[in-house]
Amino acid sequence: MEEPEIVLTCHEQRIQTLERDMSAMQGVQDEIRSMHETLVTLVNEMKHANEHLARHERKIDEIEGAPKLRLQQIVTAILAALSGGLVTVFLTRILG
């Protein structure tokens, strides 16, 4: 059987080793925490950038659609004027 003093010395050495390892791991934990905070910040910034980009895409779609809408209005106005003119000519011939 081992003597209690030898066992105690082995335990103390093991405890010192574990404490040293824990101290080294504390630095790693701090670095991981810092990286986590940085990643959270980056993700939030990307979310805001994506929302900003989506807003710009909607505006571009509106700007690109404006000439098309205006052309449709012009065509409708021309067709209405032609129809009105034809109806006027038709009524003038019938009544005149």
Image: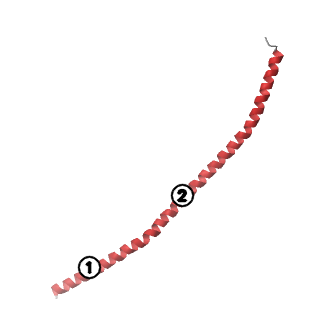
* Rendered location of residue 85, percent (x, y): 26, 83
Q: Residues within 10 Å of mark 2 (few under 14, many from 20)?
A: few
Q: Residue furthest right?
A: 5
Is residue 50 rendered to the left or right of residue 19?
A: left
Q: Nearer the viewer, residue 93 or 68?
A: 68
- Is 75 situated above or below 27? below
Residue type, label 2: Glu
- Is 45 situated above or below 81? above
Is residue 80 rendered to the left or right of residue 22?
A: left
Q: Residue furthest top?
A: 1
* Rendered location of residue 91, percent (x, y): 19, 83
Residue at image position (65%, 45%) is 36
Residue at image position (30%, 80%) is 81
Is residue 52 rendered to the left or right of residue 76?
A: right
Q: How many marks?
A: 2
Pick the quarter of the image with the C terminus. Answer: bottom left
Check disc 1 and report its element: helix, strand or loop.
Answer: helix
Residue type, label 1: Ser
Q: Within the image, what quadrant is residue 12 found in?
A: top right
Residue at image position (47%, 69%) is 63
Mark 1 and 2 residues: CB-CB less than 8 Å, in contact? no
Residue at image position (70%, 43%) is 31
Pick the quarter of the image with the N terminus. Answer: top right
Q: Residues within 10 Å of mark 1 (few under 14, many from 20)?
A: few
Q: Earlier in the sequence, mark 1 or mark 2?
A: 2
Q: Nearer the viewer, residue 80 or 32?
A: 32
Check disc 2 and report its element: helix, strand or loop.
Answer: helix
Picture disc at residue 54 = none
Residue at label 1? 83
* Rendered location of residue 53, percent (x, y): 53, 60
Compute the Cα span from label 1 to label 2: 47 Å
Residue at label 2? 51
